[in-house]
C-alpha cells in the first residue's frame, strides 16, 4: 500500500471540492476502497483519501411525503433493519440485508455499496497486471478469458464485468433518485462501466442521499455460491412503477443493473405463476452468454420468476 494523506471531511461540499482535481478519492466505510488501494489495482493512486464518515447528518433515514430519504452514509445494517425501509421499500431492505456479512454491513454504507467498483477479477488483479479496457487498455480480457462470472447481456464500452452491488437493482426497480453534490440522477441512469467507476459520477462529485418512492410491495432475491459473505452471481429486484406495473431489474448479468422490458411485458396483465414463468423466459431471450457463463442464463430465468412470485397475490 502506498502512502496517502487522510482528510476528515466536515461536509459533502468540502469533500467534493477536495476531490475536484481527481487526486483525492472519497471513502465511506472503506470496505471496498481500501482493498483496491492495498492491492494497487490502478495505474494511478490518490494523493489524499477524503473520509466522509466525519460528515454529520448524512446517515439519516426519514419519510418525506410519498418517498423515503436515505443518506449516503446510512450503514447497510441500518437500511436492512429500518422499519420505514422494510415497510415502504422492502426490496432495498432485503438487498441491504444480503450484502456480505454482519461486520461489513455495519461498516459499509449505502452510498459505498452503490458506488463500489466492479468485482471483475481481471480489473481487480493486484499491481494492475491486466491493464484492461477500463484502465485505458485496448481489450477486455474477460471476452475470451475466464468469464464465468461476467456479463450475459453483452458489453458496456467494451467491458464485460458484471455489476456486483446488491442494492443497485433494488434502487432502480424502486425508481429511486441519486442526489449528488452537483445534480439529481435517476438510479436507472446512474450505473455503468466508466473508467474505474461503476457510475456516472465525475471527479469532485459526492453522493449525498437517495430519494426512494414508497412502494406497497417490492422484493429482492439473490443467488450466490455461498450462503454468506458472497457477491451475487445473479440478483433480481421487482417493484411497481407509478402505474403499478412491475419493474424487473437484474444484477450480476451486465456491467450495470439490467432492466428487463421483455420480462415486464410478460407480466403487464398481472403476476401469476404462469406469467412469472413467461417473464423469466422473456428476460433471458435476449441473453448473449460468453464462453463460460451460459449457466447464468438459467439462474437469471429462475431469479426473475422467483422475485415476481414474491410480490404475486
Ligand atoms: C469480503 C467482502 C464481501 C462483500 N460482499 C458484498 C456483497 O455480497 N454484495 C455487495 O453488494 N457488496 C459486497 N461487498 C462490497 C462492499 O464492500 C460493500 O458493498 C460496501 O457496501 C461498500 O461500502 P463502503 O461504505 O465500505 O464503501 P467504500 O469502500 O468506502 O467506497 C466504495 C467506493 O464508493 C465510493 N464512495 C463511497 N461513498 C461515496 C459517496 N457518498 N459519494 C461518492 N462516492 C462514494 C468510494 O470512493 C469508492 O470508490 C463485499 C466486500 C467485501 C470486502
Image (cartoon, helix red, strand yellow):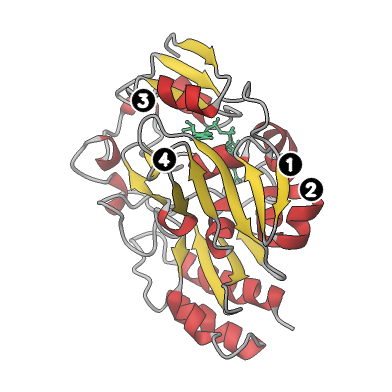
Of badges 4 and 1, nearer the viewer stands 1
Residue where numbered disc 3 is placed? 20
The first of marks 4 and 3 along the sequence is: 3
Of residues 65 and 306, the one drawn nearer to the viewer in this rendering: 65
The image quadrant that residue 289 belongs to is bottom left
Q: Residue furthest left?
A: 138
Secondary structure of residue under mark 1: helix
Using the image, tell me which numbered label, if any, was put on residue 121.
4
Instruction: Indicate the quadrant of ligand 1 in the picture.
Output: top right
Q: Is residue 76 above or below residue 245?
A: above
Residue where numbered disc 2 is placed? 81
Using the image, tell me which numbered label, if any, was put on residue 77.
1
Of residues 201 and 185, the one drawn nearer to the viewer in this rendering: 185
Secondary structure of residue under mark 2: helix
What distance separates the C-alpha of mark 4 from that of mark 1?
Answer: 27 Å
Q: CB under 8 Å between callouts 1 and 2?
A: yes
Q: Position of residue 152 (x, y in %)?
A: 39, 63
Q: CB under 8 Å between callouts 1 and 3?
A: no
Q: What residue lies at 67% left-to-right and 26% top-to-bottom?
A: 56
The first of marks 1 and 3 along the sequence is: 3
Q: CB under 8 Å between callouts 3 and 2?
A: no
Of badges 4 and 2, nearer the viewer stands 2
What distance separates the C-alpha of mark 3 from that of mark 2?
Answer: 35 Å
What distance separates the C-alpha of mark 4 from that of mark 3?
Answer: 29 Å
Of badges 1 and 3, nearer the viewer stands 3
Q: CB under 8 Å between callouts 4 and 1?
A: no
Q: Position of residue 238 (x, y in %)?
A: 60, 69
Q: CB under 8 Å between callouts 4 and 2?
A: no
Using the image, tell me which numbered label, if any, was put on residue 236.
none
What distance separates the C-alpha of mark 1 from that of mark 3?
Answer: 30 Å
Q: Residues within 10 Å of mark 2 (few under 14, many from 20)?
A: some
- Quadrant location of the C terminus in the rendered image: bottom right
Amino acid at each position: 500500500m502506498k502512502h496517502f494523506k487522510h482528510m476528515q471531511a466536515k461536509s459533502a461540499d468540502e469533500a467534493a471540492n477536495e476531490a475536484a482535481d481527481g487526486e483525492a478519492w472519497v471513502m465511506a466505510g472503506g470496505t471496498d476502497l481500501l482493498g483496491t488501494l492495498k492491492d494497487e489495482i490502478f495505474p494511478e493512486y490518490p494523493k489524499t483519501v477524503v473520509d466522509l464518515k466525519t460528515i454529520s447528518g448524512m446517515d439519516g433515514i426519514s419519510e418525506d411525503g410519498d418517498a423515503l430519504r436515505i443518506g449516503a452514509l446510512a450503514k447497510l445494517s441500518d437500511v436492512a433493519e429500518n422499519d420505514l425501509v422494510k415497510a415502504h421499500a422492502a426490496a432495498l431492505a432485503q438487498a441491504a440485508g444480503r450484502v456480505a456479512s454482519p461486520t461489513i454491513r455495519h461498516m459499509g454504507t449505502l452510498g459505498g455499496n452503490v458506488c463500489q467498483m466492479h468485482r471483475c477479477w481481471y480489473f481487480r488483479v493486484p499491481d494492475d497486471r491486466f491493464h484492461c479496457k477500463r484502465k485505458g487498455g485496448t481489450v477486455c480480457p474477460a471476452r475470451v478469458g475466464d468469464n464465468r462470472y461476467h456479463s450475459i447481456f453483452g458489453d458496456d464500452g467494451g467491458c464485460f464485468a458484471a455489476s456486483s452491488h446488491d442494492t443497485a437493482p433494488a434502487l432502480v426497480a424502486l425508481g429511486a433518485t441519486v442526489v449528488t453534490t452537483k445534480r439529481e440522477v435517476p438510479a436507472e441512469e446512474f450505473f455503468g462501466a466508466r473508467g474505474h467507476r461503476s457510475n456516472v459520477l465525475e471527479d469532485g462529485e459526492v453522493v449525498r442521499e437517495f430519494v426512494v418512492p414508497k412502494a406497497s410491495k417490492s422484493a429482492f432475491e439473490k443467488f450466490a455460491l455461498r450462503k454468506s459473505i458472497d457477491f451475487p452471481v445473479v440478483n433480481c429486484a421487482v417493484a411497481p412503477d407509478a402505474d403499478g406495473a412491475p419493474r424487473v431489474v437484474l444484477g450480476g448479468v451486465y456491467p450495470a443493473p439490467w432492466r428487463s422490458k421483455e420480462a415486464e411485458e410478460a407480466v403487464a396483465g398481472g403476476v401469476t405463476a404462469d406469467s412469472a414463468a413467461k417473464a423469466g423466459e422473456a428476460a433471458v431471450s435476449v441473453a448473449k452468454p460468453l464462453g463460460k457463463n451460459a449457466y447464468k442464463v438459467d439462474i437469471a430465468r429462475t431469479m426473475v420468476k422467483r422475485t415476481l412470485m414474491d410480490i404475486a397475490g
